Image: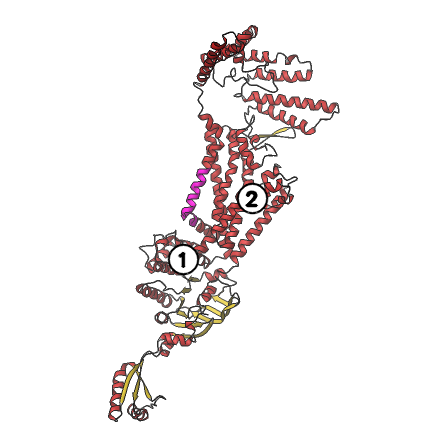
Amino acid sequence: MAKFCRLIGNEWKKQFSKVATWIMLIFLTAVTLFSSLIGNANQVLESFYTPENYWQDDLQRAKQNYEELKSQYGPDEVWVKTAKVEVDYYSYLIDHAISSDDWRYETRWSSNLPDGERSGNIIHEMIYATVFEEERAAKLSAMVENKDLAAYYAWTFEDVLKDSDPERREIYEWAYRYLIDHSIEPTSSDWRYGTLNEVVGAKFTKLDQERLQKEGLAGYSEVQYNRAKDQITLGVYRLDHNQERNPADSFEPVSSDIPEAFRAIFTLFEGGDGESPFWNSMLYSVTFLEYVAVLCIVIGGSIVSSEFSAGTIKFLLINPARRWKILMSKYATTLLFGVLATTGVFLLSFLMSLAFNGTVDAFRPALSVKGGEVVTTSPYWLLFVRYLSASVKVLVMTTFAFALSALSRSSALSIGISLAISFNASIVVMIMQLAGLDFARYFIFANWDFAAIVNKSTGFVHHSLPLAIVIVALHLVVLIWTAWDAFVRREV
Amino acid sequence: MEEILKIEHLTKSLGAKEILHDISFETYSGEVFGFLGPNGAGKTTLIKVVVGLLTLDHGRITIAGNDLAKQFEGALSNLGAIVENPEFYRYLSGYDNLVQYANMRGGIPKERIDEVVRMVGLENRIKEKVGRYSLGMRQRLGVAQAILHHPRLLVLDEPTNGLDPAGIKDLRDVLKDLAHKEGVAVMVSSHLMSEMEMMCDRVGVIANGTLISVHPIAELVSAAGIGREEFVITLDDAKKGAEVLSEAFGIEILPTEDGAIDLVFPKEEALASIAKANETLVRAGLSLYTVSKKENKRLEDVFIELTGGEGQQIG
């Protein structure tokens, strides 16, 4: 064992004495940093956005529009008045120093909570009313000027609290009380409003499902009922425990139509309520293992053959170390490179995500509901599982390059073929799957993405994980055996 | 003398062609064994089999008591070698290359590395990258690598390739010291007889994959006739001349079939003897046409003779 470690040490030293290795490591660091920037694109773009003078431009535009219309049609036309509303609106925002995240400006539209039949935010509504509906204006301006949340909710909930259906009314009453008691602002900067909206939606779904079941009507779905129940449990838990975002949401499959590879980038721009940008960006870092694969393929594809091309193989093999030990030390060194590069990619992405998203989400537990109870898991565990799953492809392709390198003794051939397969295999399988060639499911290329198989997003029906594991293991055994046979038994 | 390398009935084919045929010999501690043969005779193949790069078809190889096939690591820990050209990791320094070998063999202190570097005279350049070494320097590094772990058997394939005359002499001294003072069994292959003469204690001659003979070097030297001078005398009456000379030198001398007389003298008294022979013939009234010195049979001729004149043709 000590000798084996010394052999690995030798390989390690050789790799790090090559300029090519350093170039690749610098390249890996650069693409990881760059991809991490893309992974935090929302935050990066936001940092360029300055709210000062934001209203000024709009005001000037509105004024210009209004002046043009007025000179053309006179001040009493309806659309001229509407244009005037815009001018007054922006002037009001500027005069009262209302920022874009003020609830009165950003009064959020909600699908399940009543919103007073607004057409825009309530400031706009108020200005509009002063021009067109005098009696609404008084009520609204009291609300706006005093920042009176209770009045706002009283106004918006006025009708629904009189709902004739007692069960529906109960749900609204609960929401109303919750909003008032916790001073929740109807804005997207207060996450609780959105979460409450989701809980109320789930409560209605649950109610509908209960009624369908009671009446024995078609359309009852136990799955939907249970999902709604879990949503309520989780939403109320988050509201009560004040957990703004749930890291687990980043790991949920978006849709079975979207392959895992694209899902990560998809979530970056389509994060829902409660989704964590920090964890979206961390999940996106799983795709950087493609770069690690390039590094491993280049090292694995040359670590044996370069000894032959340099003629050093003879001097390597006349040492008191059995050939299989030498071969395995080279394989272990290649895999060690992969593990370290993966760790590096994780750490870099972690630091970048922290830098752009802060530390809050980094320490939040991932929440899920099991048997009606909220269960907390570490999101780092969920991420580790994703990294592990993505490493399967890296392992298979690295082993392939390694075996080819031992067999052909040509670095260029081994690296070239392995990279070509690595880049195109998934697409070829996808095309075959779309073309209805079901046997493609037995290809190694269709079986190395364990996360996709578990999430049922490979496109093949009834794709099972145990079968995938068997197929991967079988390929690894054959590849290592090939390398073994080529290196240990062949004559030099 | 302890037997270090023992080869018994070694047979090796590459493809359909039998490269080595039933070879058996031993080398002993404290001797330099030369392995002599023309290009293509199977020298490198034999060495590759001994160092474990090629497997053998039949036979048995034992290094310091370890069967090469069964106790591979034990056998190879007693072996140091250079096979064909000395190739090293060009992107590592000479020193780092030696560290690689030290790690693979284990138990080699840093002082030993410095010691072998001094022995081969590379102290000044050892920290340079091997990519900048000349062939001669790499050859020296090869020797350093081979003796690093105090092997009991040292196998060197044409080690003087690329060395300048001073380098060849240095190497010779190093190898002789290793063998005669430290008791290492050294096996050297070459196709240069003169080199062997200066370096080796015993020489094995190989041709066409067969070991023809094993001789102490002294035997070969005497077979080559070194230390004697031979003269050819042509004259009008060879028969009478032979009689006169037999009488004068007190040995029987016969004329050759083409009517000449061959005379062989020890080198130190050759000139005096030929003068005496001339004088004797002239006094006997014979007409002397020519007296010519016959060129010595060189070591190379012995070599070609031993290898059955196969030296010119590889195959």
Magenta segment: A13-31
Amino acid carrying label 1: it is Glu
Q: Which mark is residue A425?
A: 2
Q: Nearer the viewer, residue B287 or B250?
A: B287
Above or below: residue A57 compared with residue B56 = above
User: Is residue A218 a member of the stretch shown in magenta?
Assistant: no
Question: In this figure, which residue is indicated by the disc labeled 1?
Answer: B87
Q: Nearer the viewer, mark 2 or mark 1?
A: 2
**Looking at the image, is A351 positioned above or below residue B85?**
above
Residue B177 image offset from top left, x and y in percent: 35, 66
Q: Is residue A14 magenta?
A: yes
Letter of the chain that mark 1 sits on in the rendering: B
Residues beneath discs 2 and 1 located on the same chain: no
The reply to whether residue B64 is visible in this rendering is no
Instruction: Name the residue rendered at 27%, 87% in the picture.
Output: B289
Q: Chain of mark 2?
A: A
Which image quadrant is residue B178 in? bottom left
Q: In terms of image quadrants, where is residue A309?
A: bottom left
Q: Relative to residue A237, is residue A31 depicted above or below? A: below
Q: Main secondary structure of the magenta part?
A: helix
Q: From the viewer's perspective, is A250 left or right of B275?
A: right
- Cα–Cα span, label 2 and label 1: 39 Å
State the image coordinates of residue B130 (x, y, percent, origin top left): 37, 54
Residue at figure coordinates x 38%, y 64% from the top left? B159
Q: Residue, x 41% and y 64% (percent of image)?
A: B157
Which disc, if any, is residue A398?
none
In the structure shown, which secondary structural element does the residue marked by tag 2 occupy?
helix
- Which type of secondary structure does the marked residue at label 1 adopt? loop
